[in-house]
Amino acid sequence: MTRGIFPRRKAPDNLPRAAHWAATAVCRSSDADPDVWFPDPTDAVGIGEAKRHCRLCPVLIQCRTDALNRPERFGVWGGLDEAERAAVLKRRRADARAEAARQQTAEVTAGELAPAS
Ligand code: SF4
C-alpha cells in the first residue's frame, strides 16, 4: 500500500485570522440598539436615523456590497433601505439583460461579417 505524496499529519491550524469586516460595524457596538436598523418600511424618521448611523460606519461599503449580494430583504444595510436596495438590484438586472443582448447582437453581427468558408 502506498502512502501517497502527502504527509499523514497536518500542521496545526493556529495561524492568526484577520478580523471579519463586521467586527468594527457601528451596529455591532455594545451600545447599539439593533431595532434601529429595522424600522417599519413606512417610517421615514426611523429609516433616516438608521442611515445616519450607517454614514458613520467604517465598513459601510462592505456592508452594502454584502447586503446586495445576499440579497438582504429587510432593514437598513450599508445606508440603503429596502426600497433603495430593490432599485439597485432591479437596475443591475436590467443592465445584465442589456449587456447580454448587446453581446448577442455583437456575436450575430460577427457571424454575418465572417468570411464564408
Ligand atoms: S453600514 Fe452596515 S454594518 Fe455599518 S452600521 Fe450600517 S448596517 Fe451596520
Image (spheres, rainbow, N blue to C red):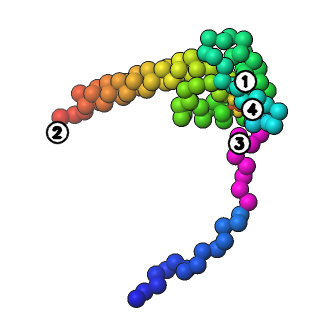
Q: Mark 4 or mark 1, which is nearer to you?
A: 1
> Visible in this render: residue 8?
yes
Q: Nearer the viewer, mark 2 or mark 1?
A: 1
Judge: label 4 CB < 8 Å from ligand 1. Answer: yes
Residue 1: image x %, image y %?
40, 88
> In this figure, which residue is indicated by the disc labeled 1?
36
Q: For this view, does 24 lie left or right of residue 12? A: right
Q: Residue at x 56, y 30 (%)?
A: 72
Q: Residues within 10 Å of mark 4 (few under 14, many from 20)?
A: many
Q: Are marks 4 and 1 in contact (CB under 8 Å)?
A: yes
Please give the residue where the numbered disc 4 appears in the rendered image. Answer: 27
Q: Residues within 10 Å of mark 2 (few under 14, many from 20)?
A: few
Q: Identify residue for label 2.
A: 117
Nearer to the camera, 61 or 110: 61
Q: Which sits earlier in the primary sequence, circle 2 or circle 4?
A: 4
Determine the CA span between mark 2 and mark 3.
Answer: 56 Å
Q: Which residue bears the numbered disc 3?
A: 21
Image coords of residue 48 (percent x, y): 72, 15
Q: CA distance from mark 2 to mark 1?
A: 67 Å
Amino acid type, callout 2: Ser
Residues in magenta?
16-24
- From the viewer's perspective, tell me whether residue 113 is left or right of residue 77: left
> Within 10 Å of the Cα at label 3, are there few (<14), some (14-19), or many (20+) other Cα atoms?
few
Q: Is residue 115 magenta?
A: no
Q: Indicate which disc, 2 or 3, sits on the residue closer to the N terminus.
A: 3
Q: Are marks 2 and 1 in contact (CB under 8 Å)?
A: no
The residue type indicated by label 1 comes to Val
